[in-house]
């Protein structure tokens, strides 16, 4: 019902939103003298803010068309070499490389937590010069037909293993935030099976490996309510006007509401500042606001089974650090990981995954040799700053690249 009301509200506001957009553009035409008055500027600014807070934001593009390698520009082409119902494996293919420039393969597992994989644009951009990068481009669940079946946490692990098999031996894997748990589970399962495609290194960044440590607001929310509460209050069925009609999902707009409520004052002030920037004609500041919120307000629906199982098994029961996590009825033994190097990264000010939650992976993987493990706590950054921004580019990304290079293995001879 809630999802249908949300769709109805969006449809009802559509004519008003289009009118506001048209009037805003009209009031910014440079050849009309009246548009330079304070009243016209204020009205145009107010109409743009209204249009932006009522629109539906489409999936952003990565827009990474080139990268610099050894001081030379190389074109980048985005391809999808493997497509599954709930995820497309995206490859950033760098053109014009010679045989000596064949870098290590890196699979970046993007979070399936409401935002699109493009949230990691800065992550990919910083690592692209040194790696052949693939990323999990998750599909909006409202666009997956019901006939494709359910998608749960075990399916997520299957997808990670599938991608690693597709990429082959000596691949490196990086998990950003939420996928740290399924990626660690996948590597443990592959290690126990002595799988030849077990990754050479695993980097976990800002992930909820053990949320009993330094619990944050989202962690406490998961503990305050039984899993039945989440199922009854946040799970909806996709309305008829989408390909995934009748699929049970955790709607992106509910997730976004939760994100924004955590820092409501900051988001309100940001839009007030946008209003003032538009009145003053400060185009650079206004464009920075637009760029950030075009990404931040673009959200996707999550499969209900996956969401509920993650809440229960990761945030409520803490099965992985307790050694009780299972996949398809099989216990996941993280102690089986012996030949995959482990790098954990945390942010000092992270209000999503508290300090120590990701580092817990070092404890539950006791059989990785000391020379193959490393931990880094980045000062002065929150959750987003762990994988985006200046400190990511200047201080974290070089460490990640060096760690991967140190544990890259030469390809096996035929």
Image (tube, rainbow, N blue to C red):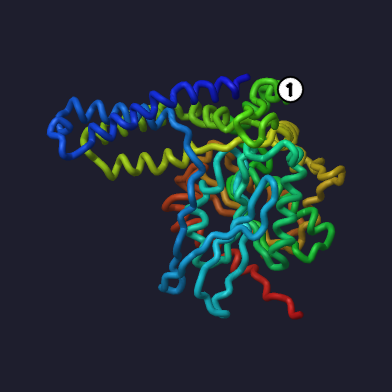
x, y percentage for residue 9?
50, 21
Which residue occupies the foreground of this view, 282 or 21?
A: 21
x, y percentage for residue 366?
75, 54
Which residue occupies the foreground of this view, 89 or 262?
A: 89
Which residue occupies the foreground of this view, 57 or 410?
A: 57
Write the residue at 56% across / 47% down.
117
Q: Secondary structure at mark 1?
A: helix
x, y percentage for residue 235?
67, 26
Write the residue at 75% across / 39% down.
147
Image quadrant assignment for residue 279: top left
Residue 386 visible (yes or no): yes
Q: Which residue is mark 1?
A: 228
Q: On screen, 170 above or below 30?
A: below
Write the residue at 72% across / 46% down.
156
x, y percentage for residue 323?
80, 43
**Placement of the N terminus among the 4 image quadrants:** top right
On the picture, is 58 further left or further right than 235? left
On the picture, is 370 further left or further right than 93? right
Write the residue at 15% across / 35% down.
32
Circle 1 residues within 10 Å: few <14, some 14–19, many ≥20: few
**Placement of the C terminus among the 4 image quadrants:** bottom right
Q: On screen, 149 above or below 91?
A: above
Image quadrant assignment for residue 270: top left
Image quadrant assignment for residue 239: top right
Q: On screen, 4 above or below 143?
A: above
Q: How many marks?
A: 1
Residue 370 visible (yes or no): no
């Amino acid at each position: 019902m809630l999802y249908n009301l949300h769709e109805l509200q969006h449809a009802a506001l559509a004519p008003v939103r289009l009118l506001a957009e048209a009037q805003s553009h009209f009031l910014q035409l440079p050849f009309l003298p009246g548009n330079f008055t304070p009243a016209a500027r204020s009205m145009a600014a107010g109409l743009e803010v209204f249009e932006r807070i009522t629109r539906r934001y489409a999936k952003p593009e990565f827009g990474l068309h080139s990268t610099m390698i050894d001081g030379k520009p190389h074109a980048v082409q985005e391809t999808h070499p493997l497509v599954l119902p709930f995820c497309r494996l995206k490859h950033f293919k760098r053109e014009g490389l010679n045989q000596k420039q064949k870098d290590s393969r890196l699979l970046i597992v993007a979070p399936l937590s409401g935002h699109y994989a493009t949230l990691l644009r800065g992550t990919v951009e910083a690592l692209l010069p040194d790696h052949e990068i693939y990323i999990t481009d998750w599909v909006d669940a409202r666009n997956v037909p019901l006939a494709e079946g359910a998608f749960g946490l075990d399916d997520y692990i299957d997808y990670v293993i599938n991608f690693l098999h597709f990429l082959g031996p000596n691949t490196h894997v990086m998990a950003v935030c939420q996928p740290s748990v399924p990626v660690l589970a996948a590597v443990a399962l592959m290690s126990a099976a002595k799988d030849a495609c077990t990754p050479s290194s695993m980097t976990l960044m800002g992930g909820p490996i053990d949320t009993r440590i330094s619990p944050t607001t989202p962690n406490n929310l998961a503990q305050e309510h039984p899993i039945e509460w989440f199922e009854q209050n946040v799970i909806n069925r996709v309305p008829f006007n989408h390909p995934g009609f009748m699929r049970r999902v955790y709607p992106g707009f509910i997730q976004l509401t939760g994100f924004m409520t955590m820092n409501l004052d900051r988001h309100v002030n940001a839009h007030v500042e946008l209003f003032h920037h538009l009145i003053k004609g400060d185009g650079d500041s206004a464009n920075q606001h637009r760029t950030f919120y075009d990404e931040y307000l673009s959200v996707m629906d999550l499969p209900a089974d996956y969401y509920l199982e993650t809440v229960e098994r990761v945030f409520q029961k803490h099965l992985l650090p307790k050694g009780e996590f299972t996949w398809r009825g099989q216990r996941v033994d993280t102690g089986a990981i012996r030949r995959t190097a482990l790098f954990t990264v945390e942010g000092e000010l992270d209000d999503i995954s508290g300090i120590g939650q990701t580092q817990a992976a070092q404890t539950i993987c006791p059989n990785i040799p000391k020379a193959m493990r490393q931990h880094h706590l980045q000062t002065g950054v929150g959750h987003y700053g762990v994988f985006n921004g200046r400190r990511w580019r200047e201080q974290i990304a070089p460490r990640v690249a060096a760690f991967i290079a140190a544990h890259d293995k030469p390809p096996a001879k035929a």
